[in-house]
Image (cartoon, rainbow, N blue to C red):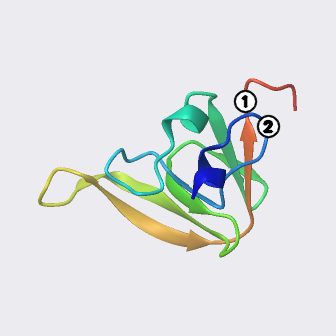
């Protein structure tokens, strides 16, 4: 688990979430401005991703669940995370 929190290099964890309540939340990596390319297109509404399983969770418009959290859809395809602070 400690390898998921290593930010000394440009390695991404296999799974990352922007929800602070998630076990896959990593503030150190998210502070570096992570971008996601999904099926070759840049996505800005990604809540969580998994590289090995090839999926992202994206928000479903402005819909909320009963706890006030955004509703998400799991979509399968090629996931490519990158750091926006580096020249691509």
Q: What residue is drawn where x is 46% and y is 48%?
A: 25
Image spot of residue 78 (x, y percent): 74, 66
Query: Furthest residue to the right?
Result: 88
Looking at the image, residue 21 sits to the left or right of residue 78; the answer is left
Q: Are marks 1 and 2 in contact (CB under 8 Å)?
A: no
Q: Residue 78 versus residue 32: which sits nearer the camera?
A: 32
Q: Earlier in the sequence, mark 1 or mark 2?
A: 2
Residue 24 vertical position relative to residue 88 in the rendered view, above or below: below
Check the image and name the residue furthest to the front: 2
Residue 45 screen position, x and y as percent:
50, 46
Distance of mark 1 from mark 2, alpha carbons? 15 Å
Q: Which residue is painted at 19% across and 60% down in the image?
A: 65
Question: For mark 2, does the 10 Å Cα neighbourhood hold few (<14), some (14 to 19), or many (20 or more) residues?
Answer: few
**Residue denoted by label 2:** 9
**Element under label 1?**
loop
Front residue of 80 and 29: 29
Which label lies toward us, 1 or 2? 2
Figure quadrant of residue 14:
bottom right
Residue at (60, 52) in percent of width and height: 2
- SS category of the residue bearing label 2: loop
Quadrant of the drawing holding the N terminus: bottom right
Count residues near mark 1 (Cα–Cα under 10 Å), then give few for <14, some for 14-19, many for 20+: few
Residue 84 numbered mark, or none: 1
**Above or below — where is 25 with respect to 72?**
above
């Amino acid at each position: 688990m400690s390898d998921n929190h290593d930010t000394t290099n440009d390695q991404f964890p296999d799974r990352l979430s922007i929800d602070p309540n998630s076990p896959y939340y990593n503030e150190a990596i998210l502070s570096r401005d992570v971008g996601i390319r999904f099926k070759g297109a840049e996505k800005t509404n990604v809540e969580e991703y998994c590289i090995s399983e090839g999926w992202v969770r994206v928000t479903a418009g402005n819909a909320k669940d009963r706890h006030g959290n955004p509703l998400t859809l799991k979509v399968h395809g090629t996931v490519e995370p990158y750091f926006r602070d580096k020249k691509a």
